[in-house]
Each structure stands twice: as structure tokens, then as C-alpha cells.
């Protein structure tokens, strides 16, 4: 007896332009159908196939049979005095992720989550308190931006920059993240310039090499957080898999192939990695690598034992790096009156729910 298999409908927001062109060709359509669809979705913001008047009625019905639109819904919203918006978004299956919008003078930066929870278990991070449940699909990450754009449209603004620095390890969900950044970067898609998109990794060496070979102009940030393996292994389990030497040689490969400068993120944690000796060691490690260091004052997480370094210590550390020829900046803080640290809003809600 033969079984009829009903093909599952697919969320149309998850396709890069070239993937959508291939889909259209598989229906015997011209590739430009994909461009028309992008125009309806991303420019006109029409999420209903039946309204797409330049596509034949019968093909609109086919699209409606095989595809659907799904955006995350806003489960919780926190607005800070400085304009920071933090959203807890709910996906189709009930999974919840955080998305944050920060207002810099150069633009509106969205911090996108790439996974539901995280399995990297960095000691200082709230995201890792909740185990990884799954990676987000490219459609869900696009959804994070579309929902934020929708909120911003009320003030005639839009997302201008993306950092994939929310919950999750982007290179642990490589393919979906790559498709997402392509949709983000597409002129007819979310229209965000490659140089305005940054993917941040805790240091998955294979992922960095693969990313180098993609030929994209998208920025790469590395969560280094320590000048040597000994300290790094205390706070980042990934450091037991790859040494700093291995990590830096992958970074050098990226710089060589992509021709791009890399950002090293370095959280300043009191009495752990913030001495001037650490600054000296970091400076000699990074000498000659086309990069700059972004010092991040540790954002206290109630479940974690760490404290942030004093302001003066951070200042002295950054001056020491500068005097050794390493460019560095101290990260500006946002939304200090809301649950600002990565993953905190979600942790707060998910743990409350369990009680
Ligand atoms: N997994 C990726 C991206 C998500 S984390 C990565 O590790 O890069 C984004 C950045 O926030 C990382 O640099 C991370 O180390 C940092 N971060 C995590 N918890 C933090 C905290 N409590 N205070 C300050 N920065 C934190």
C-alpha cells in the first residue's frame, strides 16, 4: 500500500536569495520570482501570498500550499531609559530567546541570539545556565530582526547593524547562521551592509576556518577573555579543546584569506584577568595580528561568583595595551536599569516558570 506523504510547509523567511531562486526554478519558474518575493516580504512587508499581485493566481496558490510566514511573538518587553529594548521572543514551538536593541550614535544595533540556550558553558555567562535546547533556524533569526524593525518603524527608525552576540554559539549552528547573515546582507533583503554585521565566536577553530573561506566581508569577533591557556581554561570549557595558539592561528588564517581586521573581546573580571601582567601577556600574544581589543566590563550575573574590575583597573589595563601598540576600546554599557547581561531575562523567566 502506498502512503501519501504531505510535504510540510516551509517558513519562507528562512531562504537566502540564491536558495529561493533555486526553489523557484524547481517549480519551473524564472529565478526572478525570488526577487519579486523578496521585494514583497522585505520592502513592502506583505506577509500574505494572496496579495502579491504581480505573481499569477495559480502560482500564489502553489506558494500558499508549500510555504508560510511565521514571525516570533513578543513574550516580554523591557525598555530602558537609554532607549535599549530587550525582548523575550517566543518561537512557534514555544522556545524563548532574547534579542536586544542598543542605540549607538552611529546606528541601531541588534544583538541576535543564535541558539535556544548554549552548550559552551562559559563560567561568567548567564546564557549557559540553561542548556542548549536547539539551534535557531535562519527564519527565526530573520524574525528577530523583523520584529525589532516593526517596533522601530513607529519612530521611523530601523535596525542598521547586527551583532550575533546574543545567546548561543553561532559556529555551533553554522549553516543557519550563515544563511541568516546572507539574508541580512542582501540589498533586497534586510539590507544591512556586510561591514555592519558581526559574528562573535567563543573560538570554534573549525568554524573560523570555514568562515574565512566563505568570501564574505562580514566582521568576526573572538571571545578571548584571557591572555593564556591557564586562565582561559578556568572560565571557558572550549579552551580545553583548543589552545590559544591554535585559536590565534585560525584567526591569522581568517585575516589572511578575508583581509579583514578581527575584534578580540576581553571581559574584565576582578582579580582574574585584569592585572597589568595580563595586559602585557595579551599584548605580546596579539602583536602583529590585524585586530583590536574590546574590553567589556563584566556584567554581574547573580548566579556567578565573579565581580567586575574597578574602573581604574580597566583604565590602566587599556592604557597599558595602547602603550604596547594594541588598539583597544572599552565597551559602552546599555540598559543598566533592565536585565542587561546576556541571557538574564530568559534565565529569570525560565527559572520562575519551573518553581
Ligand atoms: N558564543 C558567542 C556569542 C555569544 S556571547 C561568543 O562567545 O562570542 C557574546 C559576548 O558576550 C561574548 O564575548 C561573551 O563572552 C560575552 N559575555 C557573556 N557573559 C557576559 C557577562 N556576564 N558580562 C560581559 N560579557 C559577557
Image (spheres, rainbow, N blue to C red):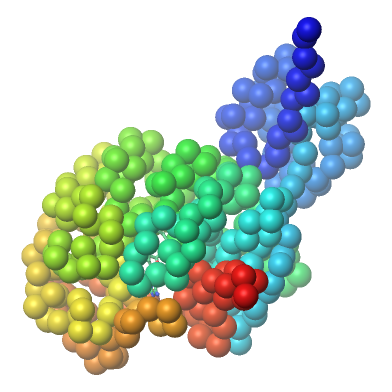
| Nearer to me, 188 or 221 | 221
Q: Is residue 260 visible?
A: yes
Q: Residue at x 17, y 48 (%)?
A: 246
User: Which quadrant of the view contains residue 295?
Assistant: bottom left
Q: Tell me the residue at 54%/71% (across/down).
A: 347
State left or right for residue 71 relative to residue 247. Answer: right
Q: How many marks?
A: 0
Left/right placement of residue 121 relative to residue 10 reads left
Where 49 falls versus 180 (above or below)? above
Quarter of the rendering occupied by the N terminus: top right
Compared to residue 9, the image places residue 94 above or below, namely below
Residue 180, placed above or below residue 333: above
Q: For residue 146, say whether it is visible.
A: no
Q: Position of residue 220 (x, y in %)?
A: 35, 53
Q: Residue furthest top?
A: 1
Relative to residue 56, is residue 71 drawn left or right? left
Q: Is residue 93 left or right of residue 258?
A: right
For the point 63% across and 40% down, the residue is: 14
Residue shown at 23% from the left, 50% from the top: 241
Residue 153 % position (x, y) = 73, 65
Q: Quadrant of residue 303?
A: bottom left
Residue 27 x, y percent position in the rendering? 73, 17
Return the residue nearer the eye: 231 or 288.
231
The percent coordinates of residue 98 (x first, y second) are 58, 65
Q: Quadrant of the C terminus?
A: bottom right
User: Which quadrant of the figure shows ligand 1?
Assistant: bottom left
Amino acid at each position: 500500500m502506498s502512503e501519501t506523504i504531505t510535504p510540510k510547509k516551509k517558513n519562507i523567511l528562512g531562504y537566502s536569495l540564491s536558495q529561493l531562486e533555486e526553489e523557484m526554478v524547481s517549480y519551473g519558474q524564472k529565478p526572478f520570482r525570488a526577487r519579486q518575493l523578496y521585494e514583497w516580504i522585505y520592502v513592502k512587508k506583505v506577509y500574505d501570498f494572496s496579495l502579491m499581485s504581480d505573481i499569477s493566481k495559480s502560482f500564489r496558490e502553489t506558494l500558499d500550499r508549500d510555504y508560510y510566514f511565521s514571525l516570533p511573538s513578543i513574550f516580554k518587553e523591557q525598555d530602558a531609559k537609554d532607549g535599549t529594548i530587550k525582548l523575550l521572543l517566543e518561537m512557534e514551538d514555544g522556545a524563548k530567546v532574547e534579542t536586544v536593541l542598543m542605540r549607538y550614535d552611529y546606528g541601531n544595533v541588534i544583538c541576535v541570539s543564535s541558539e535556544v540556550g548554549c552548550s559552551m558553558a562559559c563560567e561568567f555567562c548567564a546564557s549557559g545556565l540553561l542548556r542548549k535546547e536547539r539551534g535557531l533556524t535562519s527564519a527565526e533569526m530573520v524574525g528577530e530582526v523583523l520584529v525589532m524593525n516593526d517596533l522601530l518603524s513607529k519612530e521611523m527608525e530601523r535596525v542598521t547593524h547586527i551583532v550575533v552576540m546574543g545567546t548561543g554559539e553561532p559556529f555551533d549552528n553554522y549553516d543557519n547562521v550563515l544563511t541568516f547573515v546572507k539574508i541580512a546582507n542582501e540589498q533586497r533583503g534586510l539590507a544591512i551592509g556586510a561591514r555592519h554585521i558581526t559574528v562573535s565566536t567563543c573560538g570554534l577553530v573549525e568554524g573560523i576556518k570555514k568562515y574565512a573561506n566563505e568570501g564574505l566581508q562580514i566582521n568576526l569577533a573572538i571571545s578571548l577573555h584571557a591572555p593564556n591557556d591557564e586562565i582561559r581554561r578556568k572560565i571557558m570549557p572550549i579552551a580545553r579543546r583548543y589552545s590559544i595558539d591554535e585559536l590565534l592561528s585560525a584567526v591569522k588564517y581568517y585575516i589572511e584569506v578575508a583581509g579583514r581586521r578581527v575584534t578580540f573581546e576581553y571581559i574584565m573580571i576582578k582579580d582574574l584577568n585584569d592585572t597589568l601582567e595580563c595586559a602585557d601577556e595579551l599584548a605580546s600574544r596579539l602583536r602583529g595580528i590585524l585586530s583590536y581589543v574590546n574590553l567589556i566590563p563584566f556584567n554581574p550575573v547573580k548566579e556567578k561568583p565573579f565581580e567586575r574590575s574597578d574602573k581604574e583597573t580597566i583604565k590602566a589595563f587599556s592604557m597599558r595595551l595602547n602603550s604596547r601598540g594594541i588598539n583597544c576600546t572599552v565597551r559602552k554599557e546599555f540598559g543598566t536599569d533592565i536585565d542587561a547581561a546576556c541571557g538574564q531575562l530568559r534565565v529569570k523567566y525560565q527559572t520562575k516558570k519551573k518553581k
